């Protein structure tokens, strides 16, 4: 089996690109494209994120 080797520079570059992707905002219309409620699993707990008629967001456990 072949093993891939990465230099420290390439690993750092990959890590930084993932970090920069995380910092990019996600448009709420993308999250709520089919519904006004989405469910988020965080640390084994389920949360619901709702978009109200007034455009506010409500997070409930």
Image: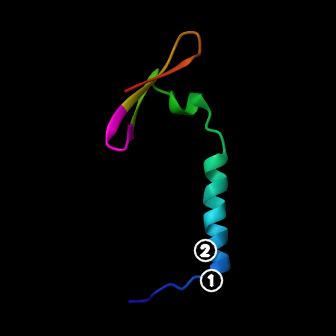
- Give residue 38's position: percent from left, percent from top: 43, 29
Q: Is residue 20 above or below residue 58?
A: below
Magenta stretch: includes residue 42 = yes
> Given contact means CB atoms under 8 Å apart, are the residues at marks 1 and 2 in contact?
yes
- Secondary structure of the residue carrying tag 1 is loop
Residue at 38 percent across and 30 percent down: it is: 47
Residue at 54 percent across and 10 percent down: it is: 53
Mark 1 lies on residue: 7
In the foreground, 40 or 35? 40
Magenta stretch: includes residue 7 = no
- Give residue 21's position: percent from left, percent from top: 63, 52
Left or right of 51? Residue 48 is left
Q: Is residue 52 above or below residue 45?
A: above
Residue count near mark 2 (Cα–Cα under 10 Å), binned few <14, some 14–19, many ≥20: few
- Quarter of the image for residue 29 reads top right
Residue at 33 percent across and 37 percent down: it is: 45
Residue count near mark 1 (Cα–Cα under 10 Å), binned few <14, some 14–19, many ≥20: few
- Furthest-left residue in view? 44
- Give residue 37's position: percent from left, percent from top: 43, 23
Q: Which residues are magenta?
A: 41-46
- For the C terminus, which image quadrant? top left
- Furthest-top residue in view? 54
The answer to whether residue 35 is seen in the rendering is: no
The color scheme shown is: rainbow
In the foreground, 26 or 43? 43
The answer to whether residue 30 is seen in the rendering is: yes
Q: Is residue 29 above or below residue 16?
A: above
| Disc assigned to residue 11 | 2
């Amino acid at each position: 089996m072949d093993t891939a080797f990465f230099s420290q520079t390439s690993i750092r570059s990959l890590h930084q690109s993932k970090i920069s992707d995380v910092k990019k905002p996600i448009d709420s219309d993308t999250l709520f494209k089919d519904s006004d409620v989405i469910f988020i699993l965080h640390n084994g707990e389920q949360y619901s994120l709702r978009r109200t008629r007034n455009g506010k967001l409500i997070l409930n456990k």
